[in-house]
Image (cartoon, grey):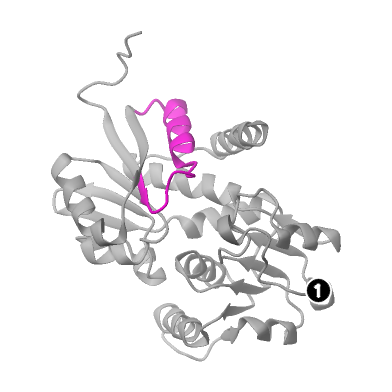
Amino acid sequence: MINADINADTKVFAVLGCPVGHSLSPLIQNTAAGLKGHNMVYTAMCVEPEQLGDAVKGGRALGISGFNITVPHKKAVMEHLCGLDPLAELIGAVNTLKLTENGYVGYNTDAVGAYYALAEAGADVKDKNVLVIGAGGAGYACAAMAFMRGAKSLYIANRTVAVAKAFAEHLALSVYKTDKNSVSAIGIDDIYGLDGIDIVINTTILGFGAKAGQTPVKDVSWCKKAGVSTVFDVVYSPWETRLLREAKGVGIKTVNGFPMLVYQALAAQEIWFDTEFTPAEKQEICAGLTKYYLSN
């Protein structure tokens, strides 16, 4: 059968990562494009870290209109770009590239995706005490989201405290021009000394892939004692990580990473095509993809 919908005017997009075979981005982006009528195709490309610069350069030469960037390239890709969106510069990590006449400009839509994933679940970070576990690209995005959306206090917990501290200071100086603020850096084992925490966000890979069955919160009863109302894990495969399963077991609301994945993808497409999805369209796409994912 001839597919006349793909032609010389079809824009090409892809997600770059390593590994990337598990990515649901092609499903999400092509589904959204169909709803909006965008003449585009989207695929996944596995790029080894040492080949990242060549991949970006080659993409520009081929006229590939944009990329999504995933692990482990979200920080490393920044040195290969001609510019950064202010939010991406603040976060210090990029997950979306848009082709311009000067090269690729980097954006970060993870923060937007995290915000809408929580909002959809009825969890607003404004005036809440938020704990973000992990200080990688996703951790930076979630911490920046909570900080900029008005969290009452923010804790960034990481195995290497110095990394979390550096980002906490960067956030404060960039947003409030001062290092005197309500964001703190702590070690992961120090979370059990916290109290009055409303929302916990796990951005580590504990619970995913080879680390499935692991959790960054070894004693989930602490969540109940600390007053946690919502636990959000950015992992979406498995659908329910050990962290979410145990949190649900003590009566805490849980949110997995699939809605974040969908909403950050839609935000990327809005950047590429200078368009907007309506709230109804976003909900329709997210609901439809969730149903599809869980049935396959």
Residue 195 percent location from the top left of the image: 76, 82
Which residue is more in the foreground, 193 or 106?
193
Farthest residue toward the front? Answer: 210
Q: Which residues are magenta?
A: 15-38
- Location of residue 62 with respect to 248 vertically, above or below: above
Please give the residue where the numbered disc 1 appears in the rendered image: 227
Queried whether the magenta region covers residue 19, the answer comes back as yes
Where, quadrant-wise, is the N terminus in this rendering?
Answer: top left
In the image, farthest residue toward the bottom: 180
Instruction: Name the residue: 47% across, 27% down.
Output: 35
> What kind of residue is marked 1?
Gly
Asked where in the image residue 118 lies, by quadrant, the reply is bottom right
Q: Is residue 63 visible?
A: yes
Q: Is residue 229 left or right of residue 282?
A: right
User: How far from the left and from the top, in percent, is residue 54?
Assistant: 19, 54
- Residue 39 in the image: x percent, y percent? 32, 27
Q: Which image quarter is the C terminus in?
A: top right
Instruction: Report helix, strand or loop for mark 1.
Output: loop
Q: Is residue 198 above or below residue 182?
A: above
How would you rate the neighbour count of disc 1 (Cα within 10 Å): few for under 14, some for 14-19, many for 20 or more?
A: some
Could you tell whether 200 is left or right of 44 in the image? right
- Quarter of image, res 280: top right
